[in-house]
Image (cartoon, coloured by chain):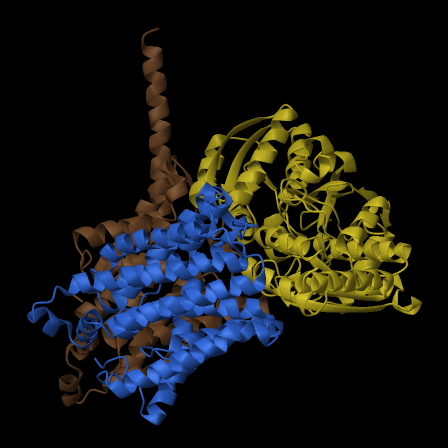
Chain colours: A blue, B yellow, C brown
Amino acid sequence: MTALTDDTLPMTPRAMRDEMIMFGIMAVLLAVVPFTGIYPFFVMQGLCFALVACAFNLLIGYGGLLSFGHAMFLGTAGYCAAHALKVWNLPPELGIVVGTAAACVLGIITGYVSIRRQGIYFSMITLALSQLLYFIYLQAPFTHGEDGIQGIPQGRLFGIFDLSRPTTLYYMVLIGFLAAFLLIYRTINSPFGEVLKSIRENEQRAISLGYKTDHYKWLAFVLSGTLAGFAGALKVFVAQNASLTDVHWSMSGEIVLMTLVGGLGTVFGPVVGAFVIVAMQQYLASFGQWVTVIQGVIFVACVLLFRRGIVGEVAHFFKRSL
Amino acid sequence: MSKTAVASLLLSTALSFAAISAACADDKIVKIGALSDQSGLYADLGGPGSTLAAQMAVEDSGMTGKGWKIDIIAGDHQNKPDIGVNIARQWFDVDKVDVIVDVPNSGVALAVSNIVKEKNGILLDSGAGTSDLTNAQCTPNTIHWTYDTYTLAHGTGTALTKSGGDSWFFLTADYAFGAALERDTTAAVKATGGKVLGGVKAPLSTADFSSFLLQAQASKAKIIGLANAGADTTNSIKQAAEFGITSGGQKLAALLLFITDVHSLGLKTAQGLNFTETFYWDMNDATRAFAKRFQERMKNHNMPTMVHAGVYSSLLHYFKALEALGGNPHDGAKVVAKMKDMPTDDQLFGKGSIEPNGRKIHPAYLFEVKTPAESKGPWDYYKLVSTIPAEDAFTPLDKSTCPLLKK
Amino acid sequence: MAAETPELKRTGAERESMQALYAQLLVGLINGSFYALLSLGLAVIFGMLNIINFAHGALYMMGAFVAYFLLNIWGINYWWALLLSPIVVGIFGMILERTMLKFLTGLDHLYGLLLTFGLALIIQGVFQNFFGSSGLPYSIPDQLRGGMNLGFMFLPVYRGWVVVFSLVVCLATWFLIERTRLGAYLRAATENPTLVRAFGINVPRMITLTYGLGVGLAALAGVLSAPINQVRPLMGADLIIVVFAVVVIGGMGSIMGSIITGFALGVIEGLTKYFYPEASNTVVFVLMVLVLLVKPTGLTGRAA
């Protein structure tokens, strides 16, 4: 079995510097968006999906675990945040906390079940679990089934910032995204991240070195799920609704696709991939029916021709780690 | 007076001037967005047909001859509320769309209706079923045109019970829409003196209904009410025929069914089904003429569904209101108020009116699907069982929970 | 006498509910035969190619569509479709294997899953574009129309046929793989392809044929289901996830294991539909969780 990426160079100061520069460029570019006339809701949506993809990438790119059910975190957090905001009338910051915490609890439970099997079994189990949740949400009264939770109040963050103003909302989403991104980056380069990578490369060896690999994998799963949930909670403010779309398996597929397009196991790949896919959905909307087919073609092309993804190929070309 | 105060005063004056000049500049430009499901479950009953219906409405209104410039753009919400909201928001912000039509799928319709209110646009909904659009979630910018769950439930429930089908068993799709249909129909059946013997909740998208159908058969109810939609309905109808339910003397009542569904089932399977619609192409000369023109221009040569007819007739009424206003004020609530003031009259739905909660009312019809022997040709599918007068077909105003009504 | 009446009534009611139970068991068996055919195909493919075939649901759908085309374009009836459709779809599958899947040999298993997921999206999308979503009718062949009264239920002849036929097919596949020389080669090639090649056997061709066989089984299930369900582009999309859960429960180690689990889960689902219908679409997933907690390798599976 070959590793998912062949570019896992040990972290050198140069690589670290490159990545920090890239991060700076990304942060500045995103920060000036409201002044460029680019449609802010498009970018906000892209950011939410980028965060989910990054969280997903933490699991697959560094833990070697392909979760085909990440939509369950996105959707669960969305529903819980939406319910907290609309029914309990909680302020935005607490709504986000409720959503994220719900995803965390879900991660603990589903992680406990799914990390018992590896490889493709893990993928099938996560897919089945997310389908189970889909059906539960479809029938649960608080989600309003197919109608979803609508007209969610955006409120004032910390009682000060009016989130119904697009620019304010944008910066909240951006700050949330950047903070979570840094957390993921920090995790990858921590001792914990190193152990994860060693499990991905050779689990038996990691076990023989005395690591309780299941605990590491479980923790990675919970962290990934929680961050995906954080993105789901942010998304509630952008979309102002929470619906079954976010729990459906096709959403899980899209998350996988975003990461694959950007580059599995690259730091910035998921962000690029998410924006590519969101833009594609936006601008190919006139093709309507053909969007799924195009997505399928991209899947096939990525797997057969560009296994490193956009960022991975670029990084490989420049022999840098990105 | 501080500098900022001066500045803000100047700004607000400028703004109010801008507002006045905008109000004066009622132009004759209209942009219509046909937002529908172009490829999924509802593509046949709405989808490309709704865009065509909108085009036909523009042509038939003769507005372009009177100096109006009308554009139509189409969008695919893929049955996802967030995509629907994004498209709608972008249409208002960037493309300057005035009115959105169709929007099947209740979840998407409710989400879009919120955005439409926020942007002060107009939503003329034809495809969605949820009666929430004119109840708890009504807005001054939305008109719900063609049908809703109340129509379906009361039409079918009342009419069938009256004609002797006084014991019911429900096969309900286990989600909000199915539950609402079952609840409303149960109320109608009981109010008419019928009784409900039981029901079973089948999970959404079940492929195999045999188990539930066996329970329905065992109940010995005269009518089996199918409170589900789309593929669930067609599959349960098909399998009911297989299990000999209809030939055993029990009747099937589909609570939501469109002519395109009957077409895809085929008369052999669908015969004898009862359901309510508000439009059928073969009602009178005017509907036949419309249907013929529609069918010729439709890519797959389908006949128009009631949703298509609703898109057409709601736009015609919208144009009438614009003409009465003498220009397009680009103020959704204002145009909708005008539309509510004017009585409606068109060839497809006849005379009607729009209630203050945004509910368009017109008669509904209980149909029965013909047997293959009775059908004289393609698309000759329905026979009329009874007509439900407009005032009985929709939620009575005093029972509507629409906040707009409390003044 | 008077004392006996309530007793009699109760037994009457009991008999009635027992009858209903039998009926549900039988109906469950019918669904089980679809699960069995599909999970069998997945197991066959997994055994040889080490790929979880995400496109299985889409190919099942194609099987039903081919039957529809055969009938409506060339007037070829159901019986021929039972034979031809699996062959046509099987050949299509072999082309996929030759042109794409084969390049994944030696790569992480996950790529196989991703590739076949992409293929599933393409196939379903294309069919959706051309045939819409509401589905096309395919009627039951005249020979299998009608039903029999079994005393406790009305059994449509066609349903009985599905159970019997798929049982036969499953057992034949089992026999082919576990009891014949060809099957022995197959199993050996899974364990050690180099060694089998040394015996002069064309392993790549065998892989292609195996994929064709697995896909053919999916198509066969599609033909069988065409008269029961509408022929729809998305008919396989949700089903495949349930079949995945079946496979996780049963493990893909043994052919017989996947057949038995398929039928068993159909029956369990059938019972749930009677006792607690709201949970009938989740019961398989809940069982999967329970099995994973108790026996992580699945009921019959070898360690992954």
Q: Nearer the viewer, residue B132 or C109?
A: B132
Seen in the picture, residue A261 relative to B9 is either above or below; the reply is below
Seen in the picture, residue C78 relative to B189 is either above or below; the reply is below
Q: Nearer the viewer, residue B224 or A54?
A: A54
Seen at 24% across and 71% down, the residue is A63
Give residue C200's position: percent from left, percent from top.
17, 90
Give residue A151's position: percent from left, percent from top.
57, 50
Q: Nearer the viewer, residue C56 or A272?
A: A272
Seen at 86% across and 57% down, the residue is B322
Q: Quadrant of residue C255?
A: bottom left
Seen at 44% across and 54% down, the residue is A78
> Is B263 on the left or on the right of A322, as rendered?
right
Quadrant into which the C terminus of chain C falls: bottom left
Quadrant into which the N terminus of chain C falls: top left
Residue C136 visible here: no
Q: Nearer the viewer, residue A4 or B17?
A: B17
Seen in the picture, residue A208 relative to C251 is either above or below; the reply is below
Seen at 90% across and 59% down, the residue is B326
Give residue B341's position: percent from left, percent from top.
85, 44
The residue furthest top is C2
Residue B86 visible here: yes
> Is B184 on the left or on the right of B20, as rendered?
left
